[in-house]
Image (cartoon, grey):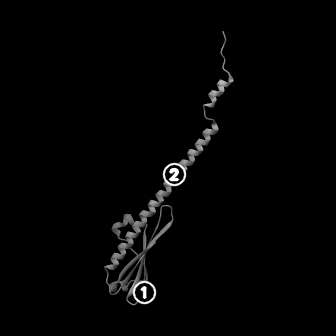
Amino acid sequence: MRLRTRTPTSLLAKHEKAFTLLELMMAAAVLLAGVMGMTQVLISGSEMIDVSRKQTIATQIIHGEIDKLHLSDWTVVSALPASASVTINSSFQGITSGFNCTRTVASVKTNMKKITFTVTWTGNTGRSYSRSSSTYFGKNGLYVTYQRS
């Protein structure tokens, strides 16, 4: 009767089926890089959504101010100071907190004013943003508006 003993080749075959420590460390590094990349994508996506939302609010503030101005007559418009800070409607204060609006008035020709509204705000990252829009207001009823970011 012969005794069977394990040969070194059978032990070696068992170890070949397992992962080495180096392979596990490389897999963990690749997984970590993937998770960090996805985190960065989420952060930048969140920032883009915040900027887009606030640009929409700034545009609505500007258009509201221009509409209020178009309801005024020439005597009110011609008496506006060259530069002023505009108070944003207080009924929207929860939405518009952190926004500042300024108005500048320039004479283009006799009986025509160019009025520019600029809204500024700070994003979640601390970066400053602004949105600007101008309208021409004439004594005899010219209303032209254009917007520039």
Query: Residue 145 versus residue 73: which sits nearer the camera?
Result: 145
Q: Which mark is residue 39?
A: 2
Q: Quadrant of residue 118?
A: bottom left
Give percent across and percent down for residue 58: 41, 69
- Which amino acid is tagged 2? Thr
Q: Quadrant of residue 89?
A: bottom left
Above-or-below relation of 47 to 23:
below
Above-or-below relation of 145 to 51:
below
83 vs 7, left or right, is left
Query: Residue 129 versus residue 91: which sits nearer the camera?
Result: 129
Crowding near the residue tagged with mark 1, few <14, some 14–19, many ≥20 C-alpha atoms within 10 Å: few
Mark sitting earlier along the chain (2/1) = 2
Give percent across and percent down for residue 83: 44, 81
Query: How many numbered markers are drawn?
Result: 2
Give percent across and percent down for residue 132: 44, 74
Q: Which mark is residue 108?
A: 1
Q: Quadrant of the N terminus?
A: top right
Crowding near the residue tagged with mark 2, few <14, some 14–19, many ≥20 C-alpha atoms within 10 Å: few
Residue reaching furthest to the right: 8
Q: Residue at x 41, y 89 (%)?
A: 109
Q: Quadrant of residue 56?
A: bottom left
Q: Residue at x 56, y 45 (%)?
A: 31
